[in-house]
Amino acid sequence: MLALALVVGSALLAGSCAGLVEPKSADANVPHPPPKLEEVLTPAQRKEHERLVASYGGTYDDPKLQALIQNMVTRLVASSERPELSYRVTILNSPVINAFALPNGSLYVTRGLLALASDESELASVLSHEMAHVIANHAATREDQMKQAVLVSRVISDVVNDPDLGALALARSRVSLASFSRGQELEADAIGVGISSRAGFDPFGAERFLKTMGRQASLRSSSSVSQNASTEQTDFLSSHPATPERISIVMANAQEYTSRGKSGERDRKQYMEAIDGLVYGDDPKEGFIRGRRFFHPKLGFTFTAPEGFSLENTSQAVLGASSSGREALRLDAVRVTGDQSLAQYLSSGWIEGVEISSVESLVLNGFPAATAVARGDQWSFRMFAIRFGSDVYRLIFAARDLTPELDRSFREAADTFRRVSIEEAENVRPLRVRIVKAGLTDTPERLAAKMDVQDRALERFLILNGLDHGAKLSYGEEYKIIAE
């Protein structure tokens, strides 16, 4: 149903792990840092790189972390079946958990994935897995699809002259490219474990990270927002599902290498130091969520959802859902021409079942606005259109049963839409990964209580640190928490 899709639908950006890599011209036995992207990419390749980076929120600049990852990649390549290949690493400023390679020899990893890993061996398992797809030439079968995705993005960004839409089109096109076949994934797992082990990393890093990904996927799918949002998100969790079969196979592969006397290093302390301070979750530049409040300092507005709602910030909209799953909301922006009133816009038919008699014009905290009710077979809607600057924001609430009490709470939530002050915007701080040492009396519950997260703090702490329920903390050991 169109009306329902407008409220609970969303599109998150996704990527694919694919690519052929250019050989190095230098002696493979002499370690050299790979050339910078601008030195090796053609103008067309550079343009596609920029589109892809834009689709993931830009690059994340951290020279220390960048150097650590690049050094890891150099180690892995030297121990791979193709030591003559060269990769250049870009860290993407996205909370989505993903890593992939492209045909131009670039390797991308999101800060969301970096936050989830707990040591270098876990990250090495992901990087070596992506290299394995390249080594096994899995990307060759989808080269035509990749070219088609690029063509679509060019048509939109060049012909329509909208680079942001071009980046989004490229990201959506990659959804169809994200999943390799079951056989290719298992082959990449086997090759990747071998590369990681030969490079001196703990081969069981792959097993640990797959388990962590599985738990993270379960946590996400159990949230009320995710259950009520018909998303198209395809990230590393969905394109590389942590199935029991994969976990058992990577474990068997790891045991084979340890039986040869190659236990490998985890390099946990060095990795923890590198990710200390890493931005976690939403970047305030793109808007962020604190409890029931959405705050966008760059655009200069904020609003607070009704009591009992959880929010999720996606690339296309802010989505929300009640704990019962019987109420939902969506906040997005559209362009409405100046010659059309907001009341006329709500009545124009972009959503079905509008009750014309319910359309009314109003002012919300100084901003021109209009509201109306629409009713469908299963859902009823309280809609608001608010003119803020050159944009119109649509705040759409949905309910299985739009009672007078619910309608009143929706109106009260709409009344919280307001401009933020310069001082408020300047004081915004992102959440970050913070590394803390466990004290003698610390427990998972105590450290979890320090987490600035929306809900299920203990579960998130355990997943973030690769710990099981009932685990005890080691005195002096470093652990991750999320805080400002």
Image (cartoon, grey):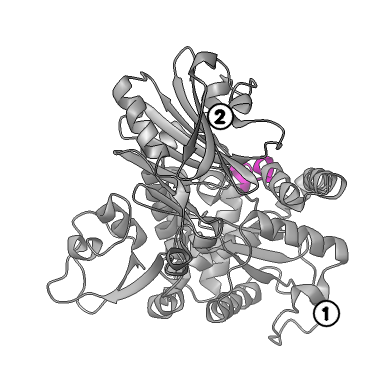
Q: Earlier in the sequence, mark 1 or mark 2?
A: 2
Q: Is residue 418 left or right of residue 326?
A: right
Does any portion of residue 375 appear in the rendered image? no
Number of residues whose C-alpha sits closer than 10 Å to that of mark 2, classed few (under 14), some (14–19) or many (20 or more): some
Give me the disc on residue 25.
1
Where does residue 57 sit, x and y in percent of width and height?
Answer: 61, 58
Q: Is residue 3 above or below residue 416?
A: above
Does any portion of residue 17 appear in the rendered image? yes
Q: Is residue 415 left or right of residue 446?
A: right
Give me the disc on residue 6.
2
Give the residue type that dot 2 points to: Leu
Give the image quarter of residue 309: top left
Give the residue type that dot 1 points to: Ser
What are the residue bounds of the magenta stretch?
A: 174-184
Camera-side residue of 242 and 157: 157
Give me the disc on residue 366.
none
Where does residue 421 sit, x and y in percent of width and height?
Answer: 46, 61
Mark 1 or mark 2, which is nearer to you? 2
